[in-house]
Image (cartoon, rainbow, N blue to C red):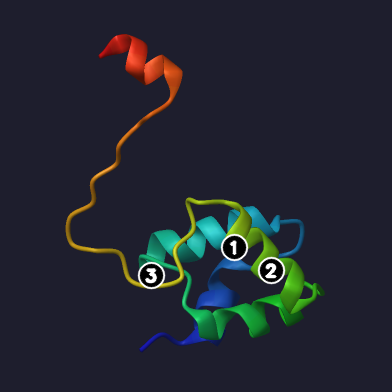
Amino acid sequence: MFDADRLIARHCCEGRSLLAVLHAIQDEAGFIPPEVVTPLARAMNLSRAEVHGVLTYYHHFRTSAPPRVGVALCRAESCRSMG
């Protein structure tokens, strides 16, 4: 599985924002493993709720392994106008 402490030690440093750390962890692991949330919150002096809130607010973050093939469909007005 994933070594949460190793991921956090590698990416969590003073002055780095939670978003930057989460992006770095996801870039390395492919997703944010759930077992990383509690140690990350402790390392950044945040509550688990704050870390979880960021994970669930931004749709870019995944908490499970991504599918092998992903399809994205844009239904915004700008995409519709371009066909």
Q: Which residue is mark 2?
A: 51
Task: Residue 68 in the image: state x and y as whole percent.
Answer: 18, 62
Amino acid type, residue under disc 1 in the picture: Leu
Q: Is residue 79 left or right of residue 17?
A: left
Quarter containing the C terminus: top left
Amino acid type, residue under disc 2 in the picture: Val
Q: Nearer the viewer, mark 1 or mark 3?
A: 1
The answer for how far apart the CA atoms under marks 1 and 3 are is 15 Å
Q: How many marks?
A: 3
Among the 4 quarters of the image, the one containing residue 2: bottom left
Q: Residue furthest left?
A: 69
Q: Secondary structure at mark 3?
A: helix
The answer for how far apart the CA atoms under marks 3 and 2 are is 17 Å
Up/down of 18 relative to 12, above or below: above
Q: Nearer the viewer, residue 21 or 77?
A: 77
Q: Which residue is mark 3?
A: 29
Q: Residue at x 49, y 58 (%)?
A: 61
Query: Tags 2 and 1 in contact by the CB under 8 Å rule?
Result: yes
Q: Residue at x 65, y 84 (%)?
A: 39
Q: Which residue is mark 1?
A: 55
Amino acid type, residue under disc 3 in the picture: Ala
Q: Nearer the viewer, residue 79 or 23?
A: 79
Q: Nearer the viewer, mark 3 or mark 2?
A: 2
Q: Nearer the viewer, residue 61 or 3?
A: 61
Q: Residue at x 66, y 84 (%)?
A: 38
Up/down of 62 relative to 36, above or below: above
Up/down of 45 relative to 61, above or below: below
Among the 4 quarters of the image, the one containing residue 78: top left
Q: Residue at x 36, y 65 (%)?
A: 30
